[in-house]
Image: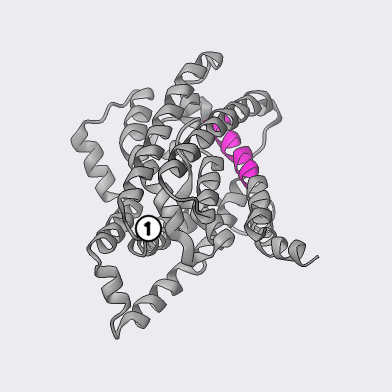
Amino acid sequence: MRQIISVLEMVFPVIFMLYIGYLCRVKNVFSKEGLAGIKSVISTIALPVVLFQAFYATEYTLSSLFILIVIFTGCCLSLAAGRLLGRFFPDSRLMPYLMAGYEVGMLGYALFGLLAGSDNLSYMVTVDLGQVIFVYTVFLTLLKSATGHKPSAKEMLKETLRNPAFLGMSIGLLFGVSGLGRLIASSPLGGVFNSTIAMITAPTSAMILIIVGYELSFRRDMFAPVLKTILLRVVVLGVLLVVSCAVIFCVVPFDKNLFMALILLFSLPAPFIIPLYADVESEGVYISTTLSMNTLVTVLIFIILSVYALS
């Protein structure tokens, strides 16, 4: 009975906040313009600070570099698999991009924080590094090319450097690798530093889940192609998860939190930024419905992981 309650302590807040977000849309608590405002606060302030906190508190080793290479390679393979499987979706240019990448920033960190505690976010950082590099290089470059816009390397670099989340991650990475973050945290002002960060990051998970719940979208006419896309993604990423874990734990000692971070990573939906960086046109409903239903699959896997976390 105690284990069931412990699982509910992790799972119920996620489901409840998703439901709150859904109610906010149904009851028109705030409009899409209001939603855009909340997104702006998260993407320009809260999420960059969450990423900064996670990256500066992470210990970087040769094992981290090895995991980065494995995850980056897995992301490239999933995109290649998406391109091969795209022939079964002749009406979609963007289906391959729904097979690759992971929405770690807007969903992964929030769920892993509930799963393993905010003190263990460094595990999610370790598995996120490879996919972040993939998303901001290979993924976005090919995504824009697929929709008719072929940005130059200079344009891509400029756009990446302007992204607040990327800047938060980069500064956190700099602080973590140099040891400056640990130096500040252990200084007399460390308490003020940590309290300020905690104040900003505390409501982030709740706000993100409200946004996800608000944007959950289901269209019956989209059910067949969406279900096919998600099933293919689950199969492809399931195989890559098994291979990645086998390779990683042949070199790195098994760690339960790292294992859970890997499972959660491979269960996440494709990046939510696809509609922001691509001209989705008629595929907008297909993409939003796929991301929504894939999010529910992630929540189901999160529930199973919650049981495993307490075992």
Q: Main secondary structure of the magenta part?
A: helix
Number of numbered discs present?
Answer: 1
Query: In screen coordinates, is 22 left or right of 143?
Result: right
Residue found at x 39% / y 72%: 197
Seen in the picture, residue 148 relative to 157 is either above or below; the reply is above
Extreme residue in the right direction: 1
Specify the quadrant of the image occupied by residue 115.
Answer: bottom right
Residue found at x 49% / y 40%: 245
Looking at the picture, which amino acid does disc 1 mark?
Thr
Residue 243's spot in the image, x, y percent?
49, 33
Q: Secondary structure at mark 1?
A: helix
Extreme residue in the left direction: 154
- Which portion, as a residue range, is magenta? 284-298
The quadrant of the rendering that contains the C terminus is bottom right
Residue 199's spot in the image, x, y percent?
45, 74
Could you say which is closer to the camera, residue 306 or residue 167? 306
Q: Is residue 244 magenta?
A: no
Seen in the picture, residue 282 relative to 107 is either above or below; the reply is above
Specify the quadrant of the image occupied by residue 24.
Answer: bottom right
Seen in the picture, residue 7 relative to 105 is either above or below; the reply is below
Residue 271's spot in the image, x, y percent?
46, 40
Could you say which is closer to the camera, residue 71 or residue 189? 71
Q: Is residue 63 visible?
A: yes
Residue 307's spot in the image, x, y percent?
69, 55
Could you say which is closer to the camera, residue 10 or residue 196? 10
Query: In screen coordinates, is 47 left or right of 183?
Result: right
Q: How busy is the neighbourhood of tag 1: few (under 14 within 10 Å), some, or many (20 plus)?
A: some
Seen in the picture, residue 91 relative to 142 is either above or below; the reply is above
Residue found at x 54% / y 35%: 242
The quadrant of the rendering that contains the N terminus is bottom right
Q: Is residue 24 visible?
A: no
Identify residue for label 1: 44
